[in-house]
Amino acid sequence: MDEARNEARRTAAQAEIGKHGRLVRGPRDGKLLSAGMLPFFRLRTPRGYGILTTTGRKSGLARPKCVRILRDGDRAYLVQLMPPHVTVEQPGAVNSWLLNVRADPHVTVKLPDGTHSGIAREITDPAELATARALLCDTVLLVDFGECTLHLRGMPSRAKIRRLHEYWFDTGRAVAVDLAV
């Protein structure tokens, strides 16, 4: 199953690689982009985004990461992303924050409505995957236009943003955070 899923990720990434800009080419670039956004997100977290804080699996330190995350009731959904260049070469690659979640699922999430503690988990249930996909892929917010400009060549549009979100969902790993209420 994992091998088939990884091949599907690789195929999707190969189809998209030419459309993506050069800003985020590897995992380190995403880390730098997140670090640059962090001070602004701490001051004012935009709708549709947040700060996911995990516990480092080796260091035990708090590891904050800016993420695109949408809340639906007592649950928040996000996707672990990999740049297409990395996905083509290593379709099974996993970000550090997801490895941290696998080691310790207790997280905090700073959303526009406040900071919440919760339990993060990879989504495996097909019905919940469909819910997460609909929420994450169909929602287009003002900030998404800027994000699309960072990731894709050309002018952003609602349709282009939706396709970018679908690409992320198809090549990434969907994660749910069950928020403590």
Image (cartoon, rainbow, N blue to C red):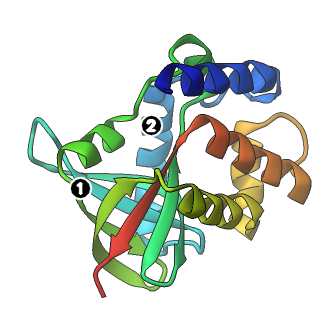
Q: Position of residue 15 (x, y in %)?
A: 80, 22
Q: Position of residue 61 (x, y in %)?
A: 12, 49
Local SS, label 2: helix
Which residue type does callout 1 highlight? Pro
Q: Relative to 166, say whether 95 is above or below.
A: above
Residue 105 occupies quadrant: bottom left
Local SS, label 1: loop
Q: Nearer the viewer, residue 64 or 77?
A: 77
Q: Position of residue 178 (x, y in %)?
A: 35, 71
The residue identified by callout 2 is 32
- Write the residue at 29% across / 58% down: 53
- Write the residue at 53% across / 50% down: 79
Q: Which mark is residue 105?
A: 1
The mark closer to the camera, 1 or 2, is 1
**Label total for image:** 2
Quarter of the figure with the C terminus? bottom left
Which residue type does callout 2 highlight? Leu
Binning the other alpha carbons within 10 Å of mark 1 as few (below 14), some (14 to 19) or many (20 upward) gives: some
Q: Position of residue 86 (x, y in %)?
A: 55, 19
- Write the residue at 51% across / 63% down: 77
